Image: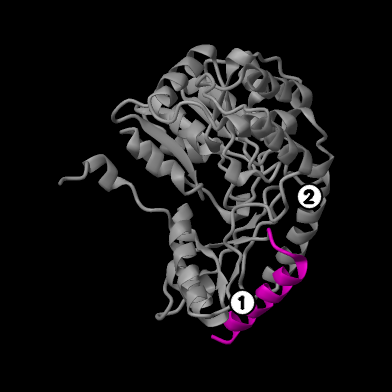
Amino acid sequence: MKISKRLMRAKPSATLAVNAKAQELRAQGKEIVSLAVGEPDFPTPQHVCEAMKKAVDDGFHRYTAVPGLPELRRAVADYYGRFYGVKATADNTIISNGGKQSLYNLFMALIDQGDEVLIPAPYWVSYPAMVELADGVPVIVPTTAESGFLAQIKDLEACCTERTKLLVINTPSNPTGGHYPQAHLDEIANWAKSKGIFIVSDEVYDRLVYAPAEYSTLSTFWEKNPEDVAIVGALSKSFCMTGWRVGTALAHPDLVKAMVKIQGQSTSNVNTMAQKAAIAAFDGSWDFIDEMRDVFHRRRDIAHEIITSWPGVVCPKPDGAFYLFPVLENFYTEETPDSASMCTKILEEVGIALVPGSAFGDDRCIRFSYAVDDEVLKTSLGKIGNMLMNK
C-alpha cells in the first residue's frame, strides 16, 4: 500500500501529540494540569443544550441541505448585521463541521496547484497543512513580538510574489491572542485588493476581545468587496461549543456554492440537532459571553503579570482569545535547545502540559492557555517559573 505524497507532506498535529504524552503520564498515575487546552473551561449555555434535547425529542434526526438549515444560515447572516452592521443574506453563508472545515473548504475551492498562500507567523497549526493538502504552497511571513506578532504591510510585501493567491489573517490570534485594530485590518485588506490577493479571515475568536481594544472584522470590507474576502466563524469559542462542531463562513454566493460542492462530497450536512442548538445560540441572549470575557480578561492579566516577571521573557499583552505566547528562548539549554524539548521537560518535571511554539511557526516561544481556574493558573505558572529559574 502506498500513501499519497500529498498526505505525506502534511505534519501531524503537535497539540494532539502533547495531549497523547499527557495522557500517557496520567495513565502512570501522575497528576497533570493542561495549559495546552484550546477550548473555554465553561459549560455550553443551558438554553443551547435544551434546544438540542428538544430537537431529539421532536424527532429532528434526518439529513438537511448540505449548507445548513435555511433559518440557521439566516441567523449567521443576521449575526454580521447585529454586531457589525453588515448586510448579508442566507445565500452568503454555509454551515460547516467546525470552523476548521470552513477553512479547508475555502482552501480547496480557491487554491490551484502551485498557488502561494501568505501565512503570518505565529500561525494556527493547521493553516500550512491545509494549504499543502490543497496543493498550494504555504509562504510563512515572520512577525515580531515587538509588533504584538501582527503582520505589517512591509512584512507581507517582502513575501509576496507573482504567484501569491491568498492571504490568511487570524484575529484574535491562536496562538498569540494578538488582535488587529480595524484600521490595521482595513490597511491590509486594501493592500491585498491592490495586489489581487484574496483574503481568508479567521475570526473564530471575534467576541473575545478585551477592553480597551475594540472589536474588528473584515466583514465590513467583504460587504463592499464580496469577491475579495471570506470570513470564517464558529460557535466553539463564543458559546463553548467545541465538541458540537458548528462552524460558519461568510462569502460571495458563487464561492459558497463551490464550498457546498466540496462539503457535499465529504461530510454533507452538519449534525442536524447541533444545527438546532446553533439557532438557539444565535437567537438567544449573548450576556453569557460578556461574563465569560470578563473572567478571561482577569486571567490574562494574572498570567501576563506572572510570566513577564520571569527574567528575560518578552510577552506581548494580547487583546483577545485566551492565550499568551511568551518568548522563552533565554531558558533554552543544551539539554532543552528548543520549544518542544522544553515543553517535554516542563511536562515531565512539574506535570504541566504546554504547546511548543514550533507548532505555530516560532520555536522561540511556547503557548500558554489561561482557560483554567484562577488558582490552578497561578499555581501552575508558579511551578513553571520556579523550574525555569532553577534550571
* Residue 389 part of the magenta-drawn span: yes
For label 1, count other residues whose C-alpha is less than 10 Å away and answer few (under 14), some (14-19) or many (20+).
Answer: some
Viewer-closest of 327 and 279: 279
Residue 191 occupies quadrant: top right
The correct choice, above or below, for 77 with respect to 28 in the image is above
Q: Nearer the viewer, mark 2 or mark 1?
A: 2
Residue 304 in the image, given as x and y percentages of width and height: 71, 64
Q: Which mark is residue 292?
A: 2
Q: Is residue 213 visible?
A: no
The residue furthest left is 1
The residue furthest bottom is 390
Residue 381 in the image, given as x and y percentages of width and height: 67, 73
Q: Amino acid at mark 1?
A: Ile
Q: Main SS type for the magenta part?
A: helix
* Residue 373 part of the magenta-drawn span: yes
The correct choice, above or below, for 37 with respect to 348 in the image is above
Q: Which mark is residue 46?
A: none
Q: Is residue 92 visible?
A: yes
Residue 45 occupies quadrant: top right
Viewer-closest of 372 and 55: 55
Question: Does the residue at mark 2 contact the one at mark 1 (Cβ under 8 Å)?
Answer: no
State which region is magenta.
371-391
Q: Where is mark 1, residue-wise?
A: 384
Of mark 2 and mark 1, the one earlier in the sequence is: 2
Q: Under tag 1, what secondary structure?
A: helix
| Residue drawn where x is 70% and y is 41% of the image | 238
